[in-house]
Image: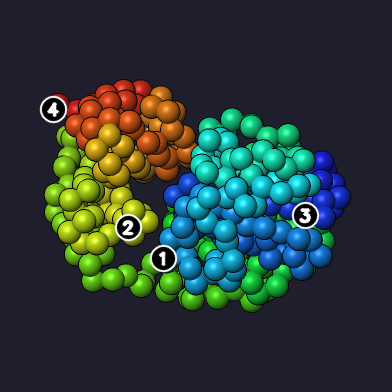
């Protein structure tokens, strides 16, 4: 892994570091942030982790999750020598922590999204990496920092979640070598999988069942869409993070190439998740509508009503399917 020497030097020369990631964080976001925090603290650095949103419930088992400063990050905006932004495609995606990041002496951007805008002083964007946690592993290896069990657990959680438990096409032989090294360093794949995937409330399962049963199909079954309305979340007392995995069920239907989930966050705010199986680059769909992400997994926030969001996304999905060579009759 080609780790920039400038990033290594910036970390080595910085006594105090602030680390953060994107809004609505997933396993790779939290895992890479906490993994880097634990490792750098073991090397004698003062590290503060900040986050615009709360840590999702299924990731609170990670060591150090309770030490993250969540919400208004203004209190963390001290004279930190370095800010490291992880798994984040653009500075605005840092949310309420952007000010604290910009107040630092130097900003580093560590990410693997192809839609990354290169917003920092030091930009390390490796689109071939399966996860940002995989990149952090390479950085620590390059710096000669030993992996403790806490670091290993956080990074393996990031690797597992961003590869779909090694099921996604971004999984490589190197990914398995990283996972093996993290397991040897004290991470438990069983504990991570149990906490992230296999512990849900009954309410969450009931809400997911309703969303699955209301799934709609378009373009002769090439596209599946799922609505997670504000009413559904209210009736089942669901947080947005608890709906994170619902889209995988739409993606898993035989014949579906593109899966879309619409989450009604407010009357004029729709969070859109996009997934594809083989041919369609959903990051291009997201980018066209102001979002970003990966070839197979991307997202965006649509300002407008649910029906407006559906019309805008449908137009881009149809275009992307045609460009990928698909044809349909409806």
Whichever of labels 1 and 4 marks the residue nearer the N terminus, that label is: 1
Q: Is residue 309 above or below residue 67?
A: above
Q: Is residue 72 left or right of residue 17?
A: left
Tell me which residue sits at (36%, 71%) in the image.
198
Mark 2 highlights which residue?
239
Q: Is residue 321 left or right of residue 10?
A: left
Are the residues flagged by discs 2 and 3 in contact, CB closer than 8 Å?
A: no
| Residue 16 badge | 3
In this view, the residue in front, 193 or 235, is 235
In this view, the residue in front, 6 or 229, is 229
| Residue 330 badge | 4
| Residue 57 badge | 1
Alpha carbon separation for disc pair 1 and 3: 29 Å
Whichever of labels 2 and 4 marks the residue nearer the N terminus, that label is: 2
Q: Which is closer to the viewer, label 4 or label 3?
A: 3
Q: Secondary structure at mark 2?
A: loop
Q: Is residue 185 visible?
A: yes
Residue 268: horizontal and vertical position, in percent? 27, 34
Q: Secondary structure at mark 1?
A: helix
Residue 164: horizontal and vertical position, in percent? 44, 57
Q: Is residue 87 visible?
A: no
């Amino acid at each position: 892994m080609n780790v920039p020497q400038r990033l290594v030097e910036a970390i080595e020369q910085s006594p105090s570091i602030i680390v953060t990631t994107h809004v609505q964080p997933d396993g790779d976001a939290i895992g890479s942030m906490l993994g880097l925090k634990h490792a750098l603290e073991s090397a004698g650095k003062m590290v503060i982790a900040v986050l615009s949103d709360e840590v999702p419930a299924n990731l609170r088992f990670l060591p150090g999750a309770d030490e993250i400063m969540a919400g208004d990050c203004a209190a963390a905006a001290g004279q930190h020598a370095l800010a490291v932004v992880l798994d984040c495609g653009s500075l605005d995606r840092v949310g309420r922590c952007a000010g604290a990041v910009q107040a630092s002496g130097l900003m580093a951007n560590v990410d693997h999204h192809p839609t990354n805008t290169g917003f920092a002083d030091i930009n390390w964007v490796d689109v071939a990496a399966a996860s940002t946690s995989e990149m952090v592993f390479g950085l620590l290896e390059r710096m000669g920092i030993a992996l403790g069990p806490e670091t290993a657990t956080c990074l393996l959680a990031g690797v597992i979640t961003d590869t779909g438990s090694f099921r996604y096409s971004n999984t490589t032989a190197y990914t398995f070598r990283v996972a093996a090294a993290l397991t040897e360093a004290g991470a438990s794949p069983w504990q991570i999988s149990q906490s992230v995937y296999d512990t849900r409330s009954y309410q969450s399962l009931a809400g997911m069942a309703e969303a699955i049963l209301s799934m709609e199909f378009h373009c002769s079954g090439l596209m599946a869409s799922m609505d997670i309305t504000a009413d559904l979340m209210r009736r089942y007392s669901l947080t947005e993070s608890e709906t994170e995995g619902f889209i995988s069920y739409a993606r898993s239907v035989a014949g579906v190439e593109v899966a879309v989930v619409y989450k009604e966050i407010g009357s004029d705010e729709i969070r859109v998740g996009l997934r594809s199986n083989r041919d369609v680059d959903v990051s291009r769909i997201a980018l066209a509508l102001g979002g970003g992400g990966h070839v197979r997994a991307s997202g965006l926030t649509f300002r407008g009503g649910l029906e407006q969001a559906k019309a805008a996304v449908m137009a881009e999905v149809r275009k992307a399917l045609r460009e990928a060579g698909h044809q349909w009759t409806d």
